Amino acid sequence: MASQFTKTPVAKDGQVAGTQTIRRAFLVLNLLRDEGKDMGVVQISQRLGLNLSTAHRIARGLVAEGYLSQDEGRERYRLGPQALLLGQAAQRALGMDVARPVLERLASVTDESVNLGLLDGHQVVVIQRIESSQPLRFSMEAGTRIELHATSMGKAVLAFNDDLGTYLDQQDEPLKQATEKTHSTLAGVRSDLEMIRERGWSTDDEESVLGVRCVGAPIFDSTGQARAAVAIQAPAVRMPYARFEELGAVVMEAASELGRVVPL
């Protein structure tokens, strides 16, 4: 009697056939998201370790569905309109659209750029940003992933999240440095975290980008754990140390309001 069941095809690496293609498509999308610029198919294949024909096939498939756009007459790809719509839908599904009025008020009061970040694994992802109206400002796109130990939002979350209690213990010294001012030792980061717990707000003193400073505060979920953070970002020339305390109070107030309206 013939079996009513069919054997599920399995790829050489043990993955179920089909899931490998899906995974590779997401790798391409994530690469272009993180790079923030268009890329050629050769670059994509080299960065992801994919066969050139495989990378080309996946890219063309994503173009056909609108998740990638291709320059006319060139083999260069960037995120497409469907990726934007998907991101906007995710914002609504997560309830993050309610945060925008709070962020806009904070940007208006300080006349500086404002970022909202959400904890994702051992990084914080910038999910919303309000740009300063000032001509001199540092640009950062939504979707940017930032390190916990080198940014104000990262340290704000790290200081008030018990689930990340062993994170620092798992890091090797010297720590990854984005600039010459990034903490390279665990002791330096732990000292920062103690101060953050005492005063309730965090700083980034040119630790992620030279010439840029930030003051941030944690956003707590219903259990009292920091799952997100908000930060004011400005060129160092407009954010002297004397402004830290003033901005710390303002950003903490915004974080408290965000904690009431944003579902975490």
Image (spheres, helix red, strand yellow):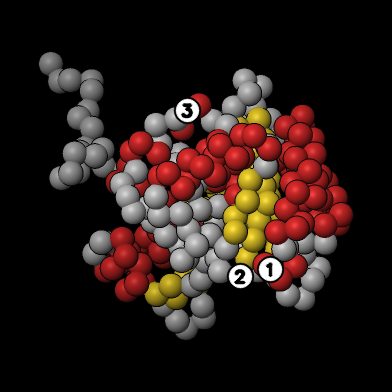
Residue 125 sits above or below residue 243 on the image: above
Q: Secondary structure at mark 3?
A: helix
Residue that badge 3 annotates: 163
Q: State which tag comes first along the sequence, 1 or 3.
A: 3
Closer mark to the observer between disc 3 and disc 2: 2
Residue 262 sits above or below residue 67 on the image: above
Residue that badge 1 annotates: 235
Q: Residue at x 68, y 37 (%)?
A: 200
The amino acid type of the residue labelled 3 equals Asp
Question: Cα distance, mark 2 to mark 1?
Answer: 6 Å
Q: Residue at x 63, y 65 (%)?
A: 212
Residue 173, labelled with which disc?
Answer: none
Whether residue 106 is visible to the viewer of this picture, yes or no, is: yes
Residue that badge 2 annotates: 211
Q: Are marks 3 and 2 in contact (CB under 8 Å)?
A: no
Most foreground residue, 2 or 141? 141
